[in-house]
Image (tube, rainbow, N blue to C red):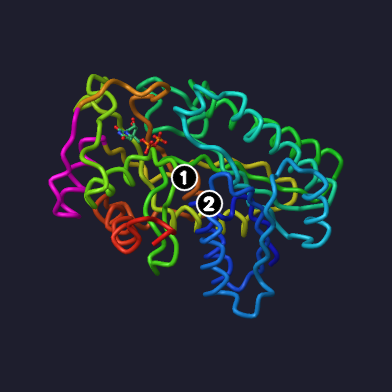
């Protein structure tokens, strides 16, 4: 299979590229490197494509229509996995238009180009942030939970999800062989277990990398963003799913998509962990004291988000294989210990 992976130099996208190449598929990556790492692509090429003919990298924005058209003409992908996005909730509150441009407008350009080029399968990285702050009786969160995002990140992702579904339904009406799926990720965590690639953001805002930077002595402490939420220990509860399980889910969905499908699935483990539980688990895994300080709530953070992942298990047969918090953190820790300065080390 020939697959176009947008955002393939980023954390999640690079894990998809790794899995696709290891599975014998050919991959074209489009990434504008605004958040991705060129070194991830170089490492993947070195390990999986010594002859240089199975992995092609194009540095471009997915909203750059002439380039995307040319890439689609050359690659003729059997499927598109669309990961490219901006994904910081806090940043989105302060720079909303940047998020609407990257996550909505550019994605619509990409989709339009894909439809023009006759792409038949399209999978979109959506987010549990599209659910906003579900009422307690809606947790664990099923796909039918009302979507009322509470930050520009969630709104910009949801807007494209709706555009994708509308386009999918329209393709069906005209009898075109198009299928699409929006996969709503919960909190993606951990690293490739072969140690080749991992999580490396700049700036770093995510909880697990920050905890591991404390364990490495790169930060003095972690600030707990809000201790007065209506949750068992007062801190936010999230569903942490291992990145390799998440990519498996993409391949499983891809394998089941049939012309006319417009599908949506939640990707999580179905269990929530609080910030305090994450800190405890990091202490166990790293043996480091992990000093903390209590801070104010972060703008745009809902108190509790965890998935009901039963729909994808029922329809596709996917279920997370790693549900133990320590195991998820251990896999991230291995990458951080071996690469204390990310791809620069
Ligand atoms: N968090 C925290 N301190 C940090 C970073 C994150 O308390 O330095 C909390 C954050 O408020 C959220 C959870 O950890 O409740 C997970 O945050 P992250 O940014 O990793 O993912 P998000 O839930 O925003 O996708």
Position above or below: 209 against 88: below
Query: Which quadrant, please, contains the C terminus?
Result: bottom left
Residue 92 in the image: state x and y as whole percent.
51, 27
Q: Which residue is mark 1?
A: 267
Q: At 41% across and 38% down in the image, what residue appears?
A: 308
The single residue placed furthest to the bottom in the displayed view is 51
Element marked by disc 1: strand
Front residue (pair 127, 221): 221
Q: Which residue is mark 2?
A: 10
Residue 273 in the image: state x and y as whole percent.
27, 38
Crowding at label 2, few (<14), some or many (≥20) Cα neighbours within 10 Å?
A: many
Could you tell me how far apart the alpha carbons at marks 2 and 1 are, in whole angstroms? 19 Å
Q: Which residues are magenta?
A: 274-293
Q: At 83% across and 58% down in the image, what residue appears?
A: 73
Front residue (pair 230, 210): 210
Crowding at label 1, few (<14), some or many (≥20) Cα neighbours within 10 Å?
A: many
Is 86 inside the magenta-drawn segment? no
Q: At 52% across and 61% down in the image, what residue appears?
A: 39
């Amino acid at each position: 299979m020939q697959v176009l992976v947008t955002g393939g130099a980023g954390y999640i996208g690079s894990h998809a590229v790794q899995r696709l190449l290891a599975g014998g598929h050919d991959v074209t990556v489009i990434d504008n490197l605004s958040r991705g790492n060129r070194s991830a692509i170089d490492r993947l090429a070195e390990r999986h494509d010594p002859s240089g003919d199975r992995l092609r990298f194009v540095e471009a924005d997915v909203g750059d229509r002439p380039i995307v058209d040319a890439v689609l003409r050359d690659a003729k992908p059997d499927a598109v996995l669309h990961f490219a996005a901006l994904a910081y909730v806090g940043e989105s509150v302060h720079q909303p238009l940047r998020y609407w441009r990257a996550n909505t407008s550019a994605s619509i350009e990409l989709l339009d180009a894909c439809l023009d080029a006759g792409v038949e399968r399209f999978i979109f990285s959506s987010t549990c942030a599209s659910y906003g702050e579900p009422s307690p009786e809606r947790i664990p969160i099923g796909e039918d939970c009302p979507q009322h995002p509470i930050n520009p990140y969630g709104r910009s992702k949801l807007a494209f999800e709706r555009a994708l579904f509308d386009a999918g339904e329209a393709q069906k009406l005209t009898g075109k062989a198009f299928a699409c799926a929006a996969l709503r990720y919960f909190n993606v965590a951990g690293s490739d277990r072969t140690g080749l690639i991992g999580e490396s953001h700049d700036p770093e805002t995510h909880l697990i990398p920050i905890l591991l930077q404390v364990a490495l002595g790169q930060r003095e402490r972690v600030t707990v963003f809000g201790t007065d939420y209506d949750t068992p220990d007062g801190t936010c509860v999230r569903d942490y799913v291992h990145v390799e399980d998440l990519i498996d889910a993409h391949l499983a969905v891809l394998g089941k998509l049939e012309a006319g499908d417009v599908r949506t699935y939640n990707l999580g483990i179905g269990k929530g962990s609080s910030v305090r539980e994450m800190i405890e688990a990091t202490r166990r895994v790293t043996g480091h004291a992990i000093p903390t300080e209590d801070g104010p709530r972060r703008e745009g953070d809902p108190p509790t988000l965890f998935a009901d992942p039963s729909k994808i298990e029922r329809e596709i047969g996917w279920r997370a294989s790693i549900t133990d918090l320590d195991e998820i953190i251990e896999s991230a820790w291995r990458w951080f210990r071996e690469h204390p300065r990310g791809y620069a080390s």
